[in-house]
Image (cartoon, rainbow, N blue to C red):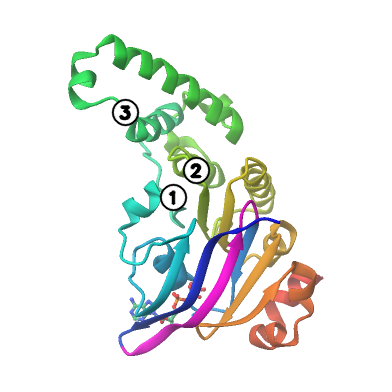
Amino acid sequence: MSSPVLTLSNVTMQIAGLTAVDQLSFSVEAGQIVSLIGPNGAGKTTTFNVISGYMRPTAGQVMLFGENIVGLSPDRIAQRGLVRSFQRTSVFAGCTVFDNVLTALHLQGRAGLWKTLLRTPGFRREEAALCEQAREMLDFLGLQSRADELASSLSYGEQRVLGVGLALAARPRMLLLDEPAAGLNPSETEAFKATVRRIGDRGITVLLVEHDMHMVMSISDHIVVLNHGRLIATGIPTAIQQDPEVIRAYLGSGLRRAQA
Ligand SMILES: Nc1ncnc2c1ncn2[C@@H]1O[C@H](COP(=O)(O)OP(=O)(O)OP(=O)(O)O)[C@@H](O)[C@H]1O
């Protein structure tokens, strides 16, 4: 049996007198693809902010790989293996696709300033290894044929995939995806789903916030549902689709479309 990589215990987040997240507890098991869903204003983004260190919860505990990460900065949390890919594209538009990935890998590299400036043999060896890793990453993302093009020339969907590649360059053990399908057309969404599955196949645990119920229902091993900051249901997709409280929370709308 797998063990949880992430556990929230009684997490509460009050913002300007409003309880955005209310006594929230749930766990994410290693290697799973888990979706965090709920109607607008349910507290999903706030929960992501708390998990990734952008907000310090008013109360509660967030355990990542067995360690309480409340109070750690996003950078420190990323060093512990949890990396977040943002809703908006975050690629360097004026650089080539290859240089985007290479730069992200460099940020994780070990070459120090002097080694880099003096272009020592150690630096050149590391540079060659990183170029190879960048090519592998572009293969993995299905962007190899676009390597020499400017990132700005990619479609919106491809830019989102590249943005995930930049997050993967940090070698996360757990990846947080913030509305990955937002703004994608149906074929881009299908391609993105395949990418997320391959990320899962690499043993990386994925937690995503997503409004596209088709994507959520077809990709998730497990779903966590929030409403008004509270957990109202958790389970496998088929159970969530039939959960009366979930259907009530959505007034049947989004969920009914996904079942159709
Ligand atoms: N910085 C803030 N200042 C004031 N209120 C906030 C702030 N951030 C979130 N809230 C409130 O907290 C509640 C939860 O918001 P949150 O953005 O986490 O929900 P969400 O589930 O991500 O919504 P959506 O699906 O619309 O993105 C909402 O009532 C929201 O108005």
**Which quadrant contains ligand 1?**
bottom left
Name which residue type carries label 3. Arg
Which residue is labeled 1 in the image?
Answer: 89
Q: Is residue 42 visible?
A: no
Which residue is labeled 2 in the image?
Answer: 159
Q: Are marks 1 and 3 in contact (CB under 8 Å)?
A: no
Which residue is labeled 3 in the image?
Answer: 110
Name which residue type carries label 2. Gln
Q: Choose the circle earlier in sequence order: 1 or 2.
A: 1
Instruction: Give the residues drawn in magenta, as a range.
Output: 17-32
- Viewer-side residue, 224 vs 27: 27
Q: Secondary structure at mark 2?
A: helix
Residue sitting at the far top:
121
Q: How many discs mark residues in the rendered view?
A: 3
Q: Are marks 1 and 2 in contact (CB under 8 Å)?
A: yes
Mainly helix, strand or loop, the magenta region? strand
